[in-house]
Amino acid sequence: MSDKNLSKRSQQVVWHPCSQMKQHENLPLISIVRGHGVWLYDADGNRYLDAISSWWVNLFGHCHPYINHALNDQLGKLEHVMLAGLTHEPVVLLSERLSKLTPGDLGHCFYASDGASATEIALKMSFHYWQQCGLTSKTDFISLQNGYHGETLGALSVTDVALFKQTYAPLLRHSQHMPSPDWRYAPQGESAENYALGAAHELENYLAEHHAHTAALILEPLVQGATGMAMYHPVYLQRAREICNQYQVLLIADEIAVGFGRTGTMFACEQASITPDFLCLSKGLSGGYLPLSVVLTTPTVFQAFYHDKTSQAFLHSHSHSGNALACRAALATLDLFEQNNAIETNRSKTNYLNQLSHPLQSHPKVKNFRNCGMIWAFEVITDDTAFTNTFFKKALEKKLLLRPLGNTVYFMPPYIINEEEMDWLVKSVVHILDTF
Ligand SMILES: *Cc1c(COP(=O)(O)O)cnc(C)c1O
């Protein structure tokens, strides 16, 4: 399979992320030499359907001619310049467009390069905001059970994934996890909406007691991605917004995974008609081309830092903040949303795949089949303790890139996937499930 030599060399010198390197003794790394649309090609010319958008970043397919053209144009002008004391057109245009596209009065854009850094920025800014306001006891963060916000130490503190977190517990700040509104936990007969209201009620009880020490609530709107595509009713977000207002707690919406159309609307918060105090974006922001993240916040937060003294400023920076090439890729990606009428077009793709998926929904090995916008997920009933790896391997044999989260198989395809590719995806997965 693919270039065996390159796979071996990679194992020698590249420490791959989220991987037990020893497992690659038996599972060669696949060396990808090119991408085109939803397809990735290995050195032997095999092609794999990228059904998870390369960790959810690639929105309009690989090597998109329009984004490539924009980047080539930008390369001839300016690749990068530091963003302190200087500015450039791509970062200004991008900030103006994000400000218009995002809900409410979000409009001040602070840039970094990856999702975890966006989380760090939102946490630091929300804490600092209360310091600036004289409410110095507001130092704690709360987050949701099964939430994921990245793996740097601050972000890991508000993440709730034991496997990623336990080892580092002595290094982490304590954060209180609120019950998740994930409808899979609802007792039989209870609606997703009622279950979400119950979870919101527990949030309210907690804050009634602890608001004086709480700076912010961070959550993933509508879909908790990394812990297994848990989906919940938007009423939770409405109640969380009201409760945060009532108790003077800032709301951080981590839309790093769900932003840019994944849940069926441009931003997931729109489905609850709420405006968070901070909106974290990354992953699809640059169409998956280059590392870029941004935190948008409101004039209220921005003004609290606007001062004669440097010491009152938000003194945080990353070398590649607002990188010109990455911003240009993001602008081209936003153009593609308009040119393709992507949100509308995705709606019919969602319907199409849902119709196709009856053999999956009724498959004896499948539990909790669910869909939200361009995300599909289900649990597989199996005794295989190494299910994740087994399924990953079997999918690759079928020329499919799918990487389950535990027993949860999910699809998060690029938005350009066509009907024929969707047919083939579902059929292949049914075949794989038949072997378990
Ligand atoms: C991926 C992800 C992050 C972290 O982003 P990185 O770029 O991997 O650091 C944070 N929050 C959510 C919801 C994510 O899905």
Image: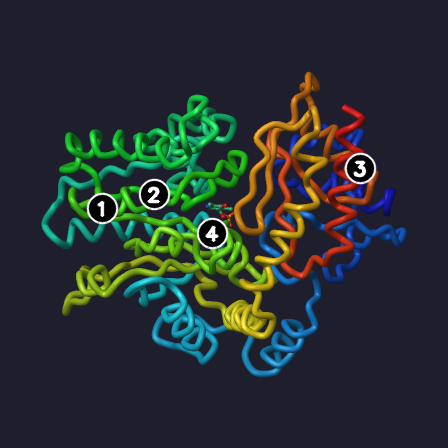
Alpha carbon distance from label 1 to label 2: 11 Å
Identify which amino acid the numbered label 2 is placed on: Val
Q: Secondary structure at mark 1?
A: helix
Residue 422: x percent and y percent? 73, 50
Q: Is the residue marked 1 within 8 Å of ligand 1, measured from its CB? A: no
Identity of the residue furthest to the left in this view: 134
Report the front residue among 435 and 177.
Answer: 435
Alpha carbon distance from label 4 to label 2: 20 Å
Alpha carbon distance from label 1 to label 4: 23 Å
Q: Earlier in the sequence, mark 4 or mark 2?
A: 2
| Labelled disc at residue 227 | none
| Labelled disc at residue 28 | 3
| Labelled disc at residue 235 | 2
| Labelled disc at residue 256 | 4
Alpha carbon distance from label 2 to label 3: 45 Å
Q: Earlier in the sequence, mark 1 or mark 2?
A: 2
Residue 193: x percent and y percent? 37, 37
Circle nearer the viewer, 2 or 3: 2
Q: Residue at x 16, y 49 (%)?
A: 131
Circle nearer the viewer, 1 or 2: 2
Q: Are marks 2 and 3 in contact (CB under 8 Å)?
A: no
Q: Earlier in the sequence, mark 1 or mark 4?
A: 1
Horizontal arrangement in the rendering, residue 55 relative to residue 103 (left or right): right
Q: Quadrant of residue 97?
A: bottom left
Q: On the image, numbered disc 1 is attached to which residue? A: 242
> Quick one: label 1, few (<14), some, or many (20+) residues within 10 Å?
some
Q: Secondary structure at mark 4?
A: loop
Q: Are marks 1 and 2 in contact (CB under 8 Å)?
A: no
Coloring applied to the structure: rainbow
> Quick one: label 3, few (<14), some, or many (20+) residues within 10 Å?
some
